Image (spheres, rainbow, N blue to C red):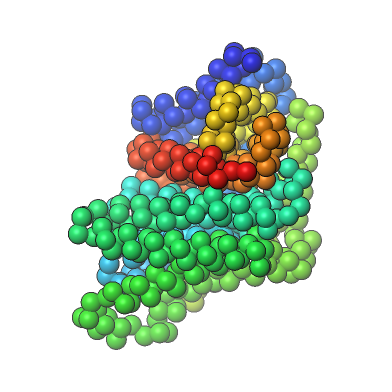
Amino acid sequence: MDYLAIALALTPVFLLILLLGFLKVSGDKSALFTLITTIVLAVLGFKFSMVAVGLSIIFGTLKAIFPIILIIIMAIYSYNVLVFTKKMEVLKFQFSNISTDKTIQVLLLTWGFGGLLEGMAGFGTAVAIPAAILIGLGFKPLFSALVSLLSNSVPTAFGAVGIPVKAVAIEIGHTNLQHLGAEVVFQLIPLMVIIPFIIVTLTDPSMKALPKNIALSVVVGLVSIAVQYFSVIYIGIETPAILGSIASIIVIVIWGKLSAKKDDDTLLQSKSNKEIMNAWSIYGLILLFIIGTSPLFNSFRTFLQSISATPIHLTINGSDKLIKIFWLTDGGVLLFLGTIIGGLLQGAKLSELFDVLWKSVIQLKKTYVTVICLIVLSTIMDLSGMITVLGIALATATGTFYPFFAPAIGCLGAFLTGSDTSSNILFGKLQANVANHIGAEPSWFAAANTVGATGGKIISPQSIAIATSACNQQGKEGDIMKKALPYAIFYIIIAGLMVYFFGK
């Protein structure tokens, strides 16, 4: 084992955590300083050429802009337009109309609506939009960021229509997607109850609310488990996050209505259905565009992509890299179209909408530095071999206890790349190789990587940057990371226990 290589590869990880979590350096400065350090280590310690560094910067910047930064801008833009047209007040009323119970409102927005966004679009929409709406409802910024990050964990396993599971299946050569998907659902069973419980308990931590919080979490969790499992088995891996979230929304709304106080019913008379539908037009159109251009309608999606693709080819360190920007199915573009059309329906002028857009772009200038630096950093760590060194080192060091630590490798991948899919591409083969070596089932460990990556999303600096942008808390990334870290560690421990005790 090359201990020097391991130490060098660990340095960017520890440095980023130190700067963000303990020294409380702002996200943009932490990311930039860590990126510079990573470049030096890659060049001197891993023989990564300066030409490769330059191409990695270009490649990483393109990956950051399309679609992540574009989605962040448009998610904030959609919220800002709602504030401008004063329709956010109607949405506040609507959530209060469902229930005045804050736990219902938060769970509905994060676990329900956020899970639906993750299932259909991913790439930060499930953090940015719920967090922004929570701010509009009067919740504190750091709280809004934290619960949005926590809820954007479990759904990412099948997020963006099952892409993470498809990616790891390709990496390990596994053709039975239903079997692999079922293993992912099984490993997530306790977390589908625990995460809703944490969210509602953070919202109302009083002992008086404990029985209600337990009951609500169990009901919502069991519904999510059942719907996701049957979706995997009988429909396919594209639908579990989507259908599970829709089922959760229905259950949470019914619970809110049944538990509402009688005098809440008078609220129903103060807003017309037309006014409520108009207020929801932006998010309704966004959902319509996302669903309509998703792989669920593959023929239409393929046609749109065939007439709107911009391919960009790069060769970095002997590895061919391709970025394809599909303008008519890009998440950021769909958010923009939904917001523009919805804003016009809500009475805004086109000139006013573009003025709000420009203000939204200016509002997020620190975020651009943070996200670009983080993605370029992960690109250099990947292509120089640093991430692989870390994964192999962890697998070697854990020995017979490897099954318990298997999700931690997936978590590491998502922490560094900000993506469950990228983590599976990075470490899927590693997990399968270790499984074969110790006589375990490769698909079980591949599922463990996916589940671990969902926990890594909670503390991924990229996800945190999206959350701070949505809550207008740029510079507070370290505070959010410190609050989220204990939950992420607990999440990975639970996942590790499931893999260790129920593996084959």
Q: Residue 23: x and y, percent?
A: 36, 26
Q: Tell me if residue 453 can be seen.
A: no
Q: How many marks?
A: 0
* 33 vs 103, nearest the viewer: 103
Give residue 87's position: percent from left, percent from top.
38, 71
Look at the image and tell me in which quarter the C terminus lies. Answer: top right
Observer-nearest of 41 and 366: 41
Which quadrant, please, contains the N terminus? top right
Q: Quadrant of residue 105?
A: bottom left
Residue 348: quarter of image = bottom left
The residue under the point 30% across, 52% down is 202
Please, is residue 156 above or below residue 212 in the view?
Answer: above
Q: Identify which residue, 472 or 427, lies in the foreground.
A: 427
Asked whether residue 295 appears in the rendered view, the answer is yes
| Residue at x 67% of width, y 18% of height | 46
Closer-to-camera residue (426/279):
426
**What residue is rendered at 70% in x and 17% in y?**
47
Where residue 84 sits in the image (x, y, percent)? 39, 66
From the top left corner, tell me how far across and down residue 456 is, in percent. 51, 41
Q: What residue do we see at 44% from left, 29% from top?
A: 17
Q: Is residue 176 left or right of residue 106?
A: right
